[in-house]
Image (spheres, rainbow, N blue to C red):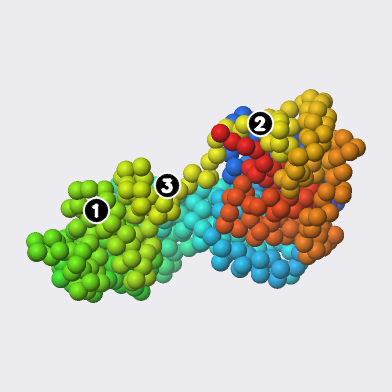
Amino acid sequence: MKLKSFKYLIGLLIFILSSPLLGEEKIDIWKNNTKKNIEPSNSSTQAVQENDNTKAANIIESPTKIQIEENKKIIAAKENIYGIFEPANYDLNLNMWSNTKADDLRSSLKRLEKIKLSKSSEEILEIILFSFSYPPPGMSEKEFVNLKIDWLIKNEKTDLIESFLKQNQEFESKSKAVQYLVDKNIANANIKEGCDKIKFIDAKIKDPYLEKFKIYCLVFNKKNSEAQLLLDLLREQNLSDKFYDSRINFLLGLTEKTDNKIDDKNLLNFYLSSVTTSDFIYKPSSKTKPEIWKYLNAANLIKFDEVNDKERLKELEIAANNNKLDKKTIFEFYRQIPFNLNNLINAKNTYQTFDETDARALIYQKYLLSETNENKIDYLFILEDLFKKSNLINVYSEFLSETIKEIGIENLPERYQETAQSRIISNDNLVQGKIKYNDKILHQSKILKYFVEEENKKKVQKDIDKIFKKVVKNKKYFISAKDLALADALIKDGFSLPVNFKYDELSKKYEVPDNLLKLIDNEQKAFLTLKIVEIIGEDEIHQLDPETIYFVTNLLNKMSLYTIRNKVIVSALPERA
């Protein structure tokens, strides 16, 4: 009886101690973890901007990874929320999807899959998808986390996958995420780093594929006794198989040879085939899995010894065009195809009589033999036409771009320069130079220091009074949509604009789409931001037209999404060196 009473008292004590935690609202777990520079949404003060010129790049910088205390990790796990970033850092909260239908989220993500998002668009999407939150109504936690993992894998976001694994201890598709990391390193023929990823494989993950890789890593690191022990346990659970056993036994030195059978059902088996088969030869086809193509390429296992096997070369060209094979490999194969001297001399007149693959190889070799830049660019453009004709331009575009860069536009005849310039694939638009403040133009003036350099608000107000007054007096000055984007943000942040600057009247000519305004009325912050990602799409923010920049910043203002808005402003408005 005393024992029962004692148990009763202990149970009551535990209940009393835990009841405050159970009584808290879901959102409260973030209250003590909000950064100091994030103020309530009704405040006129904005989130702190990045420092110095490195923050003035036009791309949106990668989101800050969330830091959660150990006890909060436990709470998050109980509440079944998954993510990487703290929502408060982006003026969001755990319930940011609560007013969005699950089907709307699914449909939007399907549309985005068809767009090659710019770096800026993708980073905003990462903020929305990977800030900790509850799923929208009509979507289970399981589907929500699977949606996140599938997106990360499809877009090959290795770093974010590792962050997700570190931040979230247990979730439905954890083994899928870990296997992706493992396979990616096998595909890159980087087994050492792949074995390092097994730190994410804990005892709670019961996945035969990962267990098999863990055993191989022990063999790889010459820990044979440990490998043998785990292999025996795997066999006892009937999770091993004849193929795997024979390969590991061979690597452990228990057998002298294998049956040389090549198994391409999965990447681990294929890799084991390649390292345990004497005179390993494998010819991939259009049905070969992409990860096996990558491994063959990384391990230099793709051979083209039969130069007359044109069908084989065509298969490899298609693989390169589909990004399964390193495109440079195709040009190496072209060099191996033999042509007589007469064909090479008269290549420009005879290439059309050749098979399409031979024609490309002939013109490529003629390009290599050309001595003048005029002849080189001439053959490069012929080769471009040949690749386009066979729908293989993806094999050639990067090669053409890099070759033109090496030659130099200035070294080409003038009649070729404009066309050659258009063929250059450049990422220069991702990084802009240092900001140049120009007080003659509102959206380029030193008022922007408030967003870029955290300029003191009193100093900013003085600049506003001075610069706006000067601009308004200039009757020839045209108030642009970019100027209004700046003015709208300043008003939202509590600054005073001159009375004669009639913002309300000026902004009437720029209409914000009604369907987006409805999202504001319904308090759908996350879904609105997802819509903005669709609007920005393939463009970097500074490439958007002024009207789009205005209504994007206007929408972000209306929803008090200050952090993202400020990054848009810094990306879109300043003049740069």
Amino acid type assigned to the residue bearing label 3 in the image:
Asp
The picture quadrant where one finds residue 444 is top right
Counting residues from the start of the chain, the first of labels 1 and 3 encountered is 3
Residue count near mark 2 (Cα–Cα under 10 Å), binned few <14, some 14–19, many ≥20: some
Considering only vertical position in the picture, is 158 above or below 42? below
Numbered badge on residue 196: 3
Residue 564 picture location, percent across and down = 70, 46
266 vs 14, nearest the viewer: 266
Q: Amino acid at mark 1?
A: Asn
Relative to 208, 468 lies left or right = right
Along the line of sight, the residue nearer the viewer: 398 or 162 = 398
Label 2 or label 3, whichever lies nearer to me, is: 2
Give x and y (percent) for residue 363: 22, 62
What residue occupies the far right of the structure in this picture?
499
Quarter residue 539 falls in:
bottom right
Point 84% across, 54% down: residue: 508
Position of 363 compared to 198: left or right? left
Q: Secondary structure at mark 1?
A: helix
How far apart are labels 2 and 3 at the CA level? 48 Å
Q: Give the residue number, with chain letter if any, for mark 1.
A: 375
Vertical placement of residue 221 versus 183, above or below? above
The amino acid type of the residue labelled 2 equals Tyr
In the image, farthest residue toward the front: 476
Q: CA distance from mark 1 to mark 3?
A: 51 Å
Reading the chain from its start, which is encountered first: label 2 or label 1? 1
